[in-house]
Image (cartoon, rainbow, N blue to C red):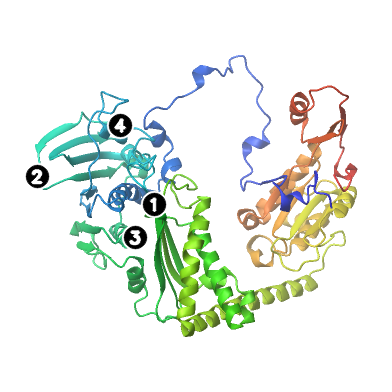
């Protein structure tokens, strides 16, 4: 089927003409727009310009992901990441983390210390003050100062300053000690010189989160800080991290110590050994290694083993935890899958052809740490690595050592291969059971006669289009992909469930047809696993009547099947109202405003412009 201007193929092959329906049908959308008043002016005077760190305090979620406990501890991550950058660059050997009873948290390192000389661009301010009070200020934008870095490139520590009730910075540099205090991002005086110091260098940042931002009861959790500090030490064997916590903050059954020192020369391999102590493992030795990129352009380290428990895989980029994975994890998974399949082919094991990377990693306990220049992340909080090159770097670096590891340990390789194939067989068995259950459910269902169902049995990838009337249903049935797309025509406006009683609702034929087609039940009897389609797409006409029917359908789903809406299964198609042609060019407009925009931009040249208005989807050809 031709995909040009195709509402059906577009959902799979290009950006869909559909938009997710918000679970809450906002009251503002249902009310008519208020009449304009002469005093309703909008001018340049209404435009706010937020300066300094004020944007951070106004919208902290944009910088640290929210104001909850996770966001609170993200402040610590930003500060310790700066110290870790000094350690990884070879300028610091220890970092101390100290949590006081008054809620202050201090991070101290013996690195080079933040520069305190006047900044060339802001001559009245020290470099320290510029870094602490200006977004996007720092020494990590190129590779002259740090080959690799994990801080938010000058954003991190200034964000911590903005969101702290009080923040104190001490810098020991050039045998002199300096200090400057801040409150909610604003300096409380200039940079102070406290005299000479000997046998000390580096930076100490001590801060207390602002209760106005995080709430009056917000407190650092010692156990969480302890784990975060410990994990940093595993990521770089050349640093020693010291932990100090006021004993009054520790509960009776809390296993977090008052003092501890972390130093793991063995890196990630040491972490796995400590994490899996006493666990039954599939292979005797983990697969671990390290690779350096030529010219100091980065490095990576990994360690992975397989055991009988639930797997976990923790990845990092420049010591930043990437909880949502990213391109480096994708490269590692590819190396594992291709290496294991190649080994299976080498020894004549044909069963490995069904193995996926998920089968390999589902029971794997692994760690991956990469150091690269100028990494790109998804979002300010850096939960996911987006650097495209990282996938190729990791896959190439891991694949060859994995091939050698499998070849040098044939007995271990055979055990691993058998284990992974067993996981694949289990996955296929579960999928077959789901398909059998769905077929049984379909046979038990008395599906509506007007439903043109899809041929595939699995719900994954299946789509149900709800259209207006038999004429629209006819065009839609001709245009659909029969394998995965079903069409359910509805006649006229459906019942308004918001004002109808339960008896009236159950007696309504259109509502009954819709519930039967979906197969998942309603309200307390809703079962997501019984839902027969992955996407339910409301595709009504582009006119006012179509919008009314769409709003009634949304109301039905929100009231009777809110779980379906929250699960991300409900979509709204955006069909065209106009067809605009000029010469060999044809475009579609969704409404009058869109039509006028297209006429002014795309069809402003010479030649006759033909405009056709669709009365409904039933007037459209299948190809359209």
Q: Which one is closest to the eye, mark 2 or mark 4?
A: 2
User: Which numbered disc covers residue 130?
Assistant: 4
- x then y, percent, for residue 543: 80, 37
Q: Residues within 10 Å of mark 3 (few under 14, many from 20)?
A: many
Residue 311 visible = no
Residue 189 visible = yes
- The span from disc 1 to disc 4 (Cα, nearest Å) is 32 Å
How many numbered marks does the figure carry? 4
Please tell me which of labels 1 and 4 falls first in the chain: 4
Q: Residues within 10 Å of mark 4 (few under 14, many from 20)?
A: many
Query: Element at badge 2?
Result: loop
- The span from disc 2 to disc 3 (Cα, nearest Å) is 30 Å
- Quarter of the figure with residue 508: bottom right
Q: Which one is closest to the eye, mark 1 or mark 3?
A: 1
**Toward the viewer: 398 or 276?**
398
User: Which numbered disc covers residue 198?
Assistant: 2
User: Which numbered disc covers residue 235?
Assistant: 3
Answer whether labels 2 and 4 touch (C-beta < 8 Å): no
Residue receiving disc 1:
295
| Residue 263 higher or lower than 157, as above or below | below
- x then y, percent, for residue 424: 60, 76
Would residue 96 be found to the left or right of residue 477 on screen?
A: left
- x then y, percent, for residue 272: 37, 71
- The span from disc 2 to disc 4 (Cα, nearest Å) is 26 Å
Please tell me which of labels 2 and 4 falls first in the chain: 4
- The span from disc 1 to disc 2 (Cα, nearest Å) is 36 Å
């Amino acid at each position: 089927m031709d995909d040009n201007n195709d509402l059906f193929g577009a959902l799979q092959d290009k950006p869909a003409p559909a938009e997710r329906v918000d679970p809450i049908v906002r009251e503002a959308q249902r009310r008519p727009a208020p009449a304009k008043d002469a005093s309703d002016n909008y001018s340049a005077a209404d435009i706010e310009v937020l300066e300094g760190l004020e944007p951070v305090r106004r919208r902290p979620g944009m910088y640290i992901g929210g104001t909850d406990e996770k966001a609170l501890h993200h402040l610590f991550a930003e500060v310790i990441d700066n110290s870790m950058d000094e350690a990884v660059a070879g300028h610091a050997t220890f970092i101390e983390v100290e949590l006081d009873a008054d809620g202050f948290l201090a991070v101290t390192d013996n690195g080079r210390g933040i520069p305190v000389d006047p900044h060339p661009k802001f001559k009245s301010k020290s470099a320290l003050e510029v870094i602490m009070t200006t977004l996007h200020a720092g020494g990590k934008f190129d590779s002259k100062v740090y080959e690799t870095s994990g801080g938010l490139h000058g954003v991190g520590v200034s964000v911590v300053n903005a969101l702290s009730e009080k923040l104190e910075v001490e810098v020991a540099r050039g045998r002199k000690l300096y200090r400057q205090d801040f409150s909610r991002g604003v300096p409380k005086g200039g940079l102070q010189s406290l005299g000479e110091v000997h046998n000390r260098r580096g930076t100490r940042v001590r801060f207390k989160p602002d209760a106005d931002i995080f709430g009056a009861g917000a407190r650092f959790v010692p156990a969480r800080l302890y784990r975060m500090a410990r994990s940093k030490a595993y990521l770089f064997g050349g640093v020693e991290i010291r932990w100090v916590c006021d004993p009054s903050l520790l509960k009776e059954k809390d296993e977090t110590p008052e003092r501890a020192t972390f130093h793991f020369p063995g890196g990630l391999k040491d972490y796995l050994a400590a994490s899996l102590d006493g666990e039954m493992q599939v292979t005797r030795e983990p697969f671990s290694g390290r690779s350096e990129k030529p010219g100091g352009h980065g490095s990576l380290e990994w360690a992975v083993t397989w055991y009988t428990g639930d797997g976990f895989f923790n990845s990092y980029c420049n010591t930043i935890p990437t909880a949502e994975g990213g391109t480096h994890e994708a490269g590692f998974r590819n190396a594992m899958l291709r290496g294991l399949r190649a080994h299976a082919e080498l020894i004549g094991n044909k069963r490995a052809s069904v193995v996926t990377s998920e089968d390999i990693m589902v029971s794997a306990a692994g760690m991956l740490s990469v150091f690269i220049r100028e990494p790109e992340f998804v979002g300010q909080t850096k939960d996911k690595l987006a650097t495209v090159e990282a996938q190729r770097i990791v896959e190439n670096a891991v694949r060859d050592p994995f091939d050698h590891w499998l070849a040098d340990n044939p007995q271990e390789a055979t055990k691993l291969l058998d284990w992974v194939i067993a996981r694949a067989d289990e996955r296929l068995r579960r999928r077959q059971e789901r398909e059998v259950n769905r077929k049984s459910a379909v046979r038990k269902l008395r599906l509506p006669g007007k439903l043109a169902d899809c041929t595939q049995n699995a719900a994954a990838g299946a789509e149900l289009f709800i259209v207006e009337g038999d004429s629209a249903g006819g065009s839609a049935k001709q245009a659909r992909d029969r394998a995965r797309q079903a069409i359910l025509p509805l006649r006229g406006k459906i019942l308004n469930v918001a004002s109808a009683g339960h008896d009236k609702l159950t007696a309504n034929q259109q509502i009954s047809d819709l519930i039967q087609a979906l197969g998942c039940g309603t309200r307390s009897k809703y079962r997501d696993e019984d839902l027969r389609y992955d996407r339910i797409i409301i595709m009504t006409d582009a006119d006012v009547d179509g919008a009314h029917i769409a709003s009634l359908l949304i109301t039905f789903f929100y009231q009777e099947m809110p779980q379906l809406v929250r699960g991300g299964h409900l979509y709204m198609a955006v069909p065209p109202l106009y067809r605009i042609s000029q010469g060999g060019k044809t475009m579609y407009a969704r409404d009058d405003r869109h039509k006028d925009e297209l006429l002014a931009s795309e069809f402003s040249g010479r030649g006759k412009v033909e405009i056709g208005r669709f009365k409904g989807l039933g007037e459209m050809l299948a190809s359209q």
